[in-house]
Image (cartoon, rainbow, N blue to C red):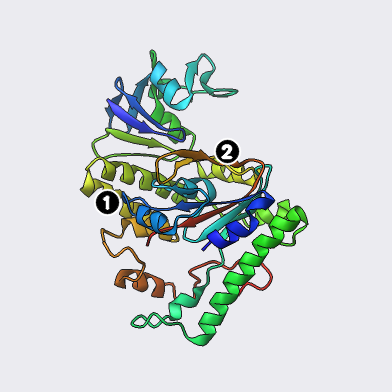
Amino acid sequence: MWQALYEELADQNFVVIAVAMDSREGDALPWIEAAKPTYPTLIDREHRLAELYGVVNVPQAIWIDEGGRIVRPAEAAGAYEGFRKMNRATRELPADAAQLTSQAKTTYLNAVRDWVRRGPDSEHALPADRARAHLPALTEDMVTAQAMFRLGQYLLRHGEREEGERWLKEASRRHPDSWCIWRQGAGVNELGLAALPDFWERVEALGDRRYYATVDMKGMP
Amino acid sequence: MATILTETGEFEAPQAEVSGEALWLSAREAETATGWVARPEGLCKTETCVPLPPGREEEFVRGARVNIAALWRHLGQPIVHSDRGHLWLLASSAHDRAAALRSLEAPNFTLPDASGRPHSLTDYRGKKVFLVTWASW
């Protein structure tokens, strides 16, 4: 999704760093090999980005300026709720959902372009007080959950499957808003795509709550 | 004998003694893994010293050994361990993480690419970075 954007903007001192929140060995590799991105594509098995930036889902993006400052904290990166209205048999979206999904993506890409071109003058580059207001609210349960997640991953990598999975489930219980944690602990499934009955069930359990939290950006549905 | 996972990496502590919720490390192991050392003022790391609670010093320091788990709990920092105590994880508190983010300095990290080569965020200083998560699921 980002390759075209990267190619368009790479000569303007811009880089995409895509991080796979994938813990199972080899999960991310086939996708990387197929896509052959020319920007760095990293693998975050222990969910370090979740620990450091409060990432809970994919795709989420953080904008960082040339001096290493956070310009926009973790937020949904041009993704929208529309998929919830998908016809699961045909994978088609109704027209309104499709339009809003497209609007979200276009709005976000244009915002990145604007920031790359205009830097801090861009309306999308958050001044310090607004950036702080949008930082994730971190709780003890969330940081403990990330610790449990990392512990569980270590145990799994060292063949201690039963206990490892138990820690991943406990991590998810402590941090139910994290889809990243939940997905890694939801049990082994070779399908690879989020099209599973348990995923849809969990999405539906959100009720009126959003899957992707609202993004503070003009034009974003 | 214990493996300790921290902010900075993974450490083997062959001299570790585990007893329930206590994780006793040698002075050198404690310093290497966590940066904390026992001094007359208490337990110290770089510029910070934490005095030991009066009457409870032995919960934290005995001779040259440090119960790093007691320190972690005393500081309100998350600590988790495997069932049999062979693996411990010492994490940062929500307070410290939030304070770091409030500075708006993007926390550095080092992660491998598909061929195993490590990349740090600081490698890209001087460019605008669009850091985006994805997953194969």
The 10 Å Cα crowd at callout 1, few under 14, some 14 to 19, many 20 or more, is many
- Whole-percent x, y for residue B64 in the image: 39, 13
Secondary structure type for disc 2:
helix
Quarter of the picture containing the C terminus of chain A is bottom right
Q: Amino acid at mark 1?
A: Glu
Separation of marks 1 and 2 at Cα, in angstroms: 34 Å
Q: Amino acid at mark 2?
A: Asp
- Whole-percent x, y for residue A123 in the image: 74, 62
Secondary structure type for disc 1:
helix
Query: Observer-nearest residue: B134 or B84?
Result: B134
- The residue lying at 42 percent from left, 82 percent from top is A92
- The residue lying at 61 percent from left, 44 percent from top is B106
Determine the residue located farthest toward the right in the rendered image: A121
Image side of residue B4 versus residue B132, left or right: left
- Front position among marks 1 and 2: 2
Chain hosting mark 1 = A
Residue that badge 2 annotates = B123
Residue A140 appears in the figure: no
Chain hosting mark 2 = B
Image side of residue A131 versus residue B43, left or right: right
Looking at the image, residue A180 lies above or below residue B74: below
Looking at the image, residue A204 lies above or below residue B17: below
- The residue lying at 53 percent from left, 72 percent from top is A80
Residue A41 appears in the figure: yes
Query: Observer-nearest residue: A221 or B69?
Result: A221
Residue that badge 1 annotates = A165
Looking at the image, residue A11 lies above or below residue B13: below
Query: Observer-nearest residue: B19 or B54?
Result: B19
